[in-house]
Image (cartoon, rainbow, N blue to C red):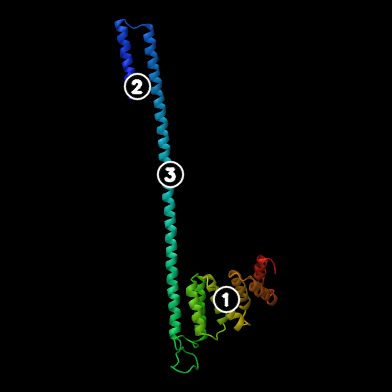
Amino acid sequence: MRTNRISAGRASVLLAALVCTGCATKGDLRDLQDEMRALALRQDSLLVELRRQNLTTRDTIRQTSNQLFEIRGDVGTRLGRMEEQLDRLTELVGQNQRTMASIRDQLEAGPRRPSGGMTGGGVGDLGVPVGGGSPEDAVTSYNAAVQTYNQGMYTAASLGFQEFIDAYPSDELVAAAYFFLGESFVQMQDLDAALEAYRQVTSFHPDSDRVPGAMLGIGLTLIDQGNTTEARIELNRLIATYGDSEAATRAREALSELGGL
């Protein structure tokens, strides 16, 4: 750009000199005029290009600024969500600790039997209660385990249900505790343990209203294990025995997905 201006200036000086000396011909003047016009066009072209590049640079800067603003906002949102999840997790851990402490206090407060002999309620040789405690204590222990299960803390829930079963083996809620124990093991992907818990319901508590759910649990768990033959047998038995139950409806749906009854 600067070189073009200097060249145009020199051309003007040269033209003036030629005019002054009387040596310039018409051809020389035309040549100089053509050169000056060419230089002016080149200057205009360079100015247009500079303006275009300037606009492009401004657009790039604006787009980059907008992207940075969006990224900053997205990061802030994600950090806020992470903080909320961390607060929730901290709350759940605290609730779990309180629940386990409550269960432990209930177990420790139960009546203990003297060492030797197995009469009456008390604790076994390993310090695990094998009975005893009031019905209210049993309900409190069971409800604490159910609450833990509902909060999605399945490992803690399975421990709570097992401790309830050990402490109150004759309680009417034992069948329900075994059922939820099986459900907890399913969530923990311990399918063999889940089957064992469900079968405790069907084998030893045949009159419980948890039997249809336990039979459904057995059938679905067998499907998860790839044992579709045994699963069909169990689900068809459920339908034949408890045909009007919600569990039977779900059994029909599962069998339909397997390709019919």
Which quadrant: the N terminus?
top left
Sequence-first tag of 3 and 1:
3
Residue carrying label 3: 66
Sequence-first tag of 3 and 2:
2
Residue carrying label 2: 4
Instruction: Please provide percent x and percent y for residue 45.
Output: 41, 24
Element assignment for label 3: helix
Instruction: Please say whether residue 191 is visible from this viewpoint.
Output: yes
Element assignment for label 1: helix
What residue type is disc 3 on?
A: Asn
What residue type is disc 2 on?
A: Asn
Element assignment for label 2: helix
Sequence-first tag of 2 and 1:
2
Callout 3 environment at 10 Å: few (<14), some (14 to 19), or many (20+)?
Answer: few
Q: Residue at x 36, y 6 (%)?
A: 25
Q: Is residue 31 above or below residue 186?
A: above
Callout 1 environment at 10 Å: few (<14), some (14 to 19), or many (20+)?
Answer: many
**Disc 2, disc 1: CB below 8 Å?**
no
Q: Residue at x 43, y 82 (%)?
A: 105
Residue 111, image quadrant: bottom left
Which quadrant: the C terminus?
bottom right
What's the distance in space between the residues labelled 2 and 1, CA to CA? 91 Å
Residue carrying label 1: 195
Instruction: Please say whether residue 140 is visible from this viewpoint.
Output: no
